[in-house]
Amino acid sequence: MPDYVIEPPRPVGLPVKGSEALFPVRRVYCIGRNYAAHSIEMGDDPDRDPPFFFQKNPDNLDPSGAFAYPGQSDNVHYEAEMAVLLKQGGTDIPVDKALDHVFGYALALDMTRRDLQEAAKQKGRPWEVGKAFERSAPIGPILPVAEVGHPAKGRLVLTVNGETKQEGDLNQMIWKVPEMIACLSEYFTLAPGDVILSGTPAGVGPVARGDVMELTIEGLGRLRIPVV
């Protein structure tokens, strides 16, 4: 084993349902505006233009069961998503082989400092300050493909304090999971441990400390996240 001049950071590991072993995270890719209604909501044309992606950091994924409201922002939004976790990677992966690369799925939230993101967009700057902040992606236990298959449809609902805020279906995604994997592999070398957040339906909005978010996806269970 090599020596390092400082202590290497601990790898990020996520819990897997039915296993004591953790899933190691390498990279986190997020697809933008992958539901037509959300694309319209954010001011875009929902036609099938080529998808665009941005990244969060591996340690933004947070399985703790709570969301810590960040500083430097007073307009933080929820975005309910499905996470896709890869067991193998490659380049130029064919669409019809893409699902062979998936280890499992999980419920997740892409929390966004909307005020900071909008300020960055207005100046043509990157989004990281609005997207890749600490604990910005609460995530539930990973459900292996052997248990849940490959969900191509299923009702998605996010409530805040019991009130429905987002509602959609996985079959409403503009770019489906195999297409996302294939497209990403044209631009990046995918690898085991990569995570893809698959976009959010319409209805994004702000939360405050003390709120409780609850995400359900048919076939994948429920994720309850208090804002602290």
Image (cartoon, rainbow, N blue to C red):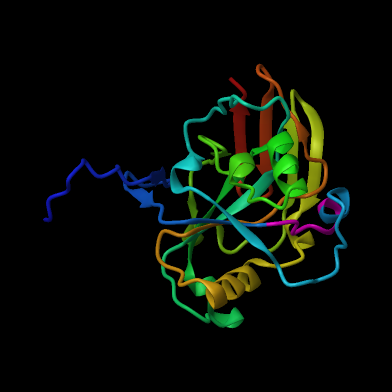
Between 40 and 167, the residue placed more toward the observer is 40
The residue sitting at 53% across, 41% down in the picture is 140
The residue sitting at 49% across, 42% down in the picture is 61
The residue sitting at 72% across, 53% down in the picture is 124
Q: Which residues are magenta?
A: 32-38
Q: Is residue 35 magenta?
A: yes
Which residue sits furthest top? 210
Between 121 and 15, the residue placed more toward the observer is 121
Q: Is residue 47 left or right of residue 180?
A: right
Between 66 and 58, the residue placed more toward the observer is 58
**Percent x, y for residue 226?**
61, 24
Position of 196 relative to 204 (above/below): below
Quadrant where the C terminus lies?
top right
**Percent x, y for residue 122?**
77, 47
Q: Is residue 203 left or right of residue 225?
A: right
Asked which quadrant contains residue 87, the reply is bottom left
Q: Is residue 60 magenta?
A: no
Q: Is residue 104 left or right of residue 45?
A: left
**Percent x, y for residue 171?**
76, 62
Between 162 and 95, the residue placed more toward the observer is 95
Q: Is residue 24 left or right of residue 207?
A: left
**Percent x, y for residue 142?**
48, 49
Q: Is residue 110 visible?
A: no
Q: Is residue 173 visible?
A: yes
Position of 39 relative to 180 (above/below): above
Quadrant where the N terminus lies?
bottom left
Asked which quadrant contains residue 222, the reply is top right
